[in-house]
Amino acid sequence: MKTKITTSILLLFFTFSFSQQKYDDWEIAKKESQISNKKILIILTGSEWCKPCVKMEKNVIENTEFISYANLNLIILEINLKRHMDYDTKLVKDYVYFRDKYQANSLPSLILVNSEGKEISKISTGLNSLEKIMKELIKYK
């Protein structure tokens, strides 16, 4: 019985550790950031159709090292544009808002902000390199 409980706890821990909570609503991400005292990483992406976005997703966002770091230090706000979508949706309006606010004119873009939305860093190069992104994020820990 004790082994089953230990196994269940470890499974739950590893499941949580290697998956990440991503938000798609700014107000919720902002509240979570304020409560947890974590910075917000805004990810502007088109992960199903944009080739650089797909590479970043595979090489960085899905990497266990990034996920572990993000779970401990970041709130993730992901604006993920779909291949075919209505341009009058909240998602597209949010994308345009963040793109314009942070002058992020390419996909993918990573923007690190504080809980009030003040830009700390914008990462727009080396986005398929885990090492480069981690180095940039850790600078502002």
Image: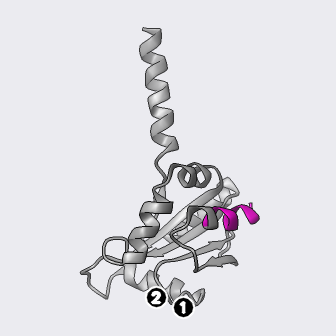
The kind of secondary structure element at disc 2 is helix
Residue 49 occupies quadrant = bottom left
Q: Marks 1 and 2: CB-CB under 8 Å?
A: yes
Q: Which residue corresponds to the image point at 26% horizontal and 81% vertical from the top-left?
A: 85
Q: Which residue corresponds to the image point at 50% horizontal and 69% vertical from the top-left?
A: 128
Residue farthest to the top, as pictured: 1
Question: Where residue 121 sits in the image (x, y, percent)?
Answer: 68, 76
Whether the magenta-drawn stretch holds residue 137 is answered as yes
Q: Quadrant of the N terminus?
A: top left
Question: Where residue 102 sits in the image (x, y, percent)?
Answer: 60, 86
Q: Residues within 10 Å of mark 1 (few under 14, many from 20)?
A: few
The kind of residue on which mark 1 rests is: Asp
User: What is the number of the mark on residue 96?
Assistant: 2
| Magenta span main SS | helix
The kind of residue on which mark 2 rests is: Val
The magenta stretch spans which residues? 133-141
State whether residue 134 is above or below residue 126: above
User: What is the number of the mark on residue 83?
Assistant: none
Name the colour scheme: one colour
Tell me the residue that label 1 is attached to.
100
**Closer to us: 38 or 141:** 141
Q: Which residue corresponds to the image point at 59% horizontal and 55% vertical from the top-left?
A: 70
Whether the magenta-drawn stretch holds residue 83 is answered as no
Q: Is residue 24 visible?
A: no
